Amino acid sequence: MNKVAYIERKNFVKFDDEHYVLYLNEERAEVSTGTAETGEMGETVQGYAYTGNMPDGGTLIEAKDVNDTNRRARFVAGLIGTEYDLDAQIAILANGNHTPQCAEELAAFEENRNTVKKAIDELLAREL
C-alpha cells in the first residue's frame, strides 16, 4: 500500500475506459509546498493523504460505463472486486450459511461490503 499526501483534496479520476482510481482512506496531513527536484523546502500547509495500491496513493478499480446515475453502484462493485473476484462473490452468496465455514465467509463478505459502501459514500460526498 502507498500513502501519498496532497495539498488539494481528491475523490476519483477515470483511469481508462474500464478503470477508475479512487482516493480512499482520507486523512488530514501536513504537506510541503517545496519540490523534490529543486530541493526547495517551501512552507508546510494542511492537506490530505490517501492510501491505496497505486503509486499515487489511489486505489485502482474496474468500473465500466460509469455515469452520474450508476456511479455509486459501479464504484461499490469495483471496490468489492479488489478483495473478491466475481467467482468468489457468486460462490459465497450461493453457499449462504449452510455450514459454519460458509456462514463465516458470508459474514466476512457482508462486513467487507458494508465497509466498502461507507468508503464510497464518504468519497462521493467529498466537496472538492
Image: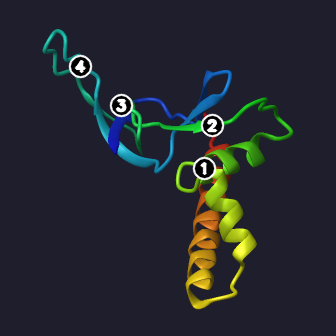
Residue that appears at 77% across and 32% down: 66
On-image quarter of the N terminus: top left
**Left or right, residue 73 beside residue 59:** right
| Left or right, 36 with reference to 96 | left
Say whether disc 3 or disc 2 marks the residue closer to the N-terminus: 3
Residue placed under numbered mark 2 in the picture: 62
Q: Residues within 10 Å of mark 1 (few under 14, many from 20)?
A: some
Name the residue type under label 1. Gly
Residue 34 - label: 4
Q: Which residue is nearer to you in this view: 66 or 11?
A: 66
* Numbered disc 3: secondary structure: loop
Separation of residues labelled 2 and 4 (CA atoms) = 34 Å
Q: CA distance from mark 1 to mark 4?
A: 37 Å
Single out the mark in the foreground, 3 or 4: 3
**Image position, residue 41 (x, y; %):** 16, 21
Placement of 92 over or under 97, stated as above or below: above
The amino acid type found where label 2 is placed reads: Glu
Residue on which disc 3 sits: 55
